[in-house]
Image (spheres, helix red, strand yellow):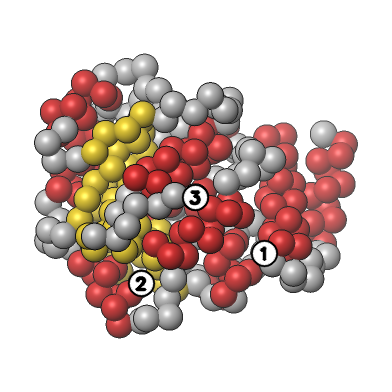
Amino acid sequence: MKIQKNKILSTVIIVNYNNEKYLKKCLNSVLEQTNANNEIIFVDDKSTDNSLKIVKKYKNKITILKNLSKNKSKHGSYNQINSYYRGFLKSKGKYIFFLDSDDYFKKNKLKEVINYFEKNLDANVVFDLAILKNKNKSTKLKFRQKRFILSSWPRFTSQSCITVKRSFMVEIFKFLKLRKFELIWFDFRIACFCYLKEKKINILPLYLTYYRQLENSASSKFNTFSSNWWIRRNQAHDFVTYLSKKLKLKDKFTIDKFFTKLITFFK
């Protein structure tokens, strides 16, 4: 993996697919950050709407990339990982911020997260908290580290709330960029890796990210207890098993895992 040398403090990687409606809000939220020493990399995953037309108006302020991977999947989760990876390879920042194009940051997000890293030198990954934007309603999402148990479906904030040290991100991609688990999203992979590798999740208890859950999003196809939901849940358990083996940890047998395997088998 050939990585650009670190010259600036932070990089925000924005991944987009057909989110023209929310693009300006997303881009402006990063451009208006209170710290100026950052770069913005925008990666488009072959959008068919007016996304590229909109983002080209910002071409003097951001780097625009297209995900040209021929290894495209029918699942948005895997394509998203490929796009973030492409953006990372072009990045220069010490701290890597991830942002979906339908989400957006509070003005002081970069400053607050970087301050946390500077005060907690052993932290490699930091999760801030999200405010769920659903039409005209805003809901603060809770993140309870004690409930982050890999024997059940882990609860954590979205990838737009994740910031990773550059040096640690190199290690993460060695384990996370896998097509085998196509239904498993980027945020789940990072959260599991951090928990297994470091035995903790670093939480910055500030609501710094606005997160949208769109009705026509890929996640909407996985309604609780549907066939797709069980299939993805099964892949999640398989992914945890895979990581445990790679990290030379003992894989736990749980009732949750047993019943997930059983139900998936008969689906």
Left of 58 or right of it: where is 155? right
Q: Which mark is residue 140?
A: none
Q: Amino acid at mark 3?
A: Met
Question: Reading the chain from its start, which is encountered first: label 2 or label 3?
Answer: 3
- Tag 1 near tag 2, CB within 8 Å: no
Circle 2: element type: strand
Q: Amino acid at mark 2?
A: Leu
What is the crowding at mark 2: few (fewer than 14 residues within 10 Å), some, or many (at least 20)? some
Q: CA distance from mark 3 to mark 1?
A: 30 Å
Residue corresponding to mark 1: 150
Residue 242 seen in the figure: yes
Could you tell me residue 145's position as x and y percent? 52, 72
Could you tell me residue 125's position as x and y percent? 44, 67
Q: CA distance from mark 1 to mark 2?
A: 21 Å
- Looking at the image, is 115 positioned above or below residue 75? below
Query: In percent of the image, x 49 and y 38: which residue is there?
Result: 82
Residue corresponding to mark 3: 1
Query: In percent of the image, x 79 and y 49: which residue is there?
Result: 260
Q: Amino acid at mark 1?
A: Leu
Q: Nearer the viewer, residue 95 or 142?
A: 95
Could you tell me residue 38's position as x and y percent? 20, 56
